Image (cartoon, rainbow, N blue to C red):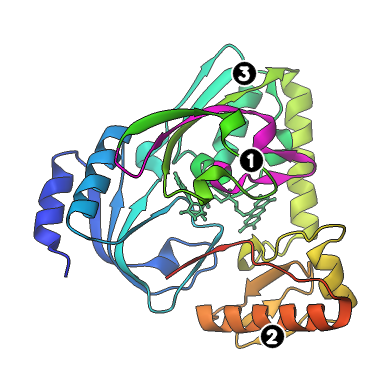
Amino acid sequence: MINIDKLTEFCSKFNCRISTEVLLSDYITFRFGGACRALIDVNSAESTAEIMKYLKANNIRYAVIGRGSNIIASDNGFDGVILHFGSDFSDISVNGKTITAQSGTMLSAVCKKAQEAGLSGMENLFGIPGTVGGALYMNAGAYGSEMKDIVVSAEYIDTNGKICTISASDMALSYRHSIFSEKECIITSVKMELSEGDPDNIKSAMNECIQKRTSKQPLDFASAGSTFKRPENSYASLLIEQCGLKGMAVGDAEVSTKHSGFVINKGNATCNDVLELCEKVKEIVKEKTGYVLELEPVILK
Ligand SMILES: Cc1cc2nc3c(=O)[nH]c(=O)nc-3n(C[C@H](O)[C@H](O)[C@H](O)COP(=O)(O)OP(=O)(O)OC[C@H]3O[C@@H](n4cnc5c(N)ncnc54)[C@H](O)[C@@H]3O)c2cc1C
C-alpha cells in the first residue's frame, strides 16, 4: 500500500507535481491503459534521484515515462508510481555546436532549436513524437539517422540514486537499443553534437520528413509507431503485407491499411486487443515466412 499523503509531502519539498489515480491512457499515444497509483512530474535530476531513493526505500514500484509514444500500457494500469518526464523538465541549451536537452524535452523541439541555430544532423529525427530521454533509451531513428549519430554523452541516475555521466561510446547504442534498457537507470539529460548547416536547408529537410511521415503513416489514429522491430535482412511492414495481414483486427486494434508496420487504435482498443493482434501477426508471419517478429514498444504493467 502506498502512503500517498507521505509521498505527496515528500514531493512537495522539491515542488514536483503529483497526481493520483491517473489514467495511463491520457499519457500514452496508443490511448489505452488503466490507472497508476500516482504520477509525479519530475523537474530536476536531483529531485528525481531523491524521489527514486524514497520509492526504493519504501518498496514502491516505479516506472519512467516520457511522451509515452513507445509504450503499451496494461488495461489493469500500473500498481505503482510513474515518474513522468515532461514539460517541467525540458530546458534546452545551445553552446557552439553542442545542444544539451533535459530528458523531458520533445525531440522535435530540439530539432527546431538546432534549425534556428543553424545546426545540422537532426533533420531526419524531426517528427519522432517522443522526448529526448525516450529517444536515447530506444536509440530512436528514422530515414537513415539515429540518436547514436549525434549523442556525445548523457547524465543519468543509477540504481543507487547517484547522478552519473556516461559517454556515447559506453551506451551500447544499436538498433532500438541502449544500455539504459538493460540497466534500470533514469536518463536526465542528453548532450548532442551537430555540425554547421544552412538554416533554410535544414528547415526544408525537416519539412520533407514531415511530408513523408504524413503521406506514409496512419497519423490520424492512435498508435505507438512501428509495432515490430525491423528483423535482420527484411522489414516488418513488408512481411506483414506479404502475409496479407493489412486490415486484420482484434476489437478496435487493427493492422493499419495505410502502413502495415503500424497497429492502430481505431477508437476503443484495449491493451489485450493490441497484444492479441500482435501475437496473431507474429504467428502468421513466422508460419509463412520463417521470420520472428519482436515487439518494439515497451509493455508497462
Ligand atoms: C506516430 C509515431 C511515429 C513514430 N516514429 C518513430 C520513428 O520514426 N523512429 C523511432 O525510433 N521511433 C518512432 N516512434 C516511437 C517513439 O516515438 C520513439 O521510440 C520515442 O523515442 C519514444 O520516446 P518517449 O518519450 O515517447 O518514450 P516513452 O514511450 O515514454 O518510453 C519508452 C521507453 O523509454 C523509457 N524512458 C523514457 N524516458 C526515459 C528516461 N528519461 N530515462 C530512462 N528511460 C526512459 C521508458 O521507461 C520506456 O521503457 C514513433 C511513435 C509514434 C506514435
Q: Which mark is residue 59?
A: none
Dot 3 falls on a residue whose secondary structure is: loop
Of tags 2 and 3, the one toward the viewer is 2
How far apart marks 2 and 3 lie (CA) works out to 45 Å
Q: Which mark is residue 173?
A: 1
- Identify which amino acid the numbered label 3 is placed on: Ala
Q: Identify the residue shown where x is 48% and y is 38%.
A: 105
Q: Residue at x 56, y 58 (%)?
A: 70
**For residue 249, which numbered disc appears in the image?**
2
> Can residue 246 be seen in the rendering of this structure?
no
Q: Identity of the amino acid at label 1?
A: Leu
Q: Secondary structure at mark 2?
A: strand
Q: Which residues are magenta?
A: 136-161
What kind of residue is marked 2?
Ala
Camera-side residue: 264 or 296? 296
Q: Is the residue 142 above or below the residue 80 in the image?
A: above
Residue holding disc 3: 117
Q: Residue placed at 18% from the left, 46% from the top?
A: 11
Q: Residue furthest top?
A: 96
Q: Are marks 2 and 3 in contact (CB under 8 Å)?
A: no
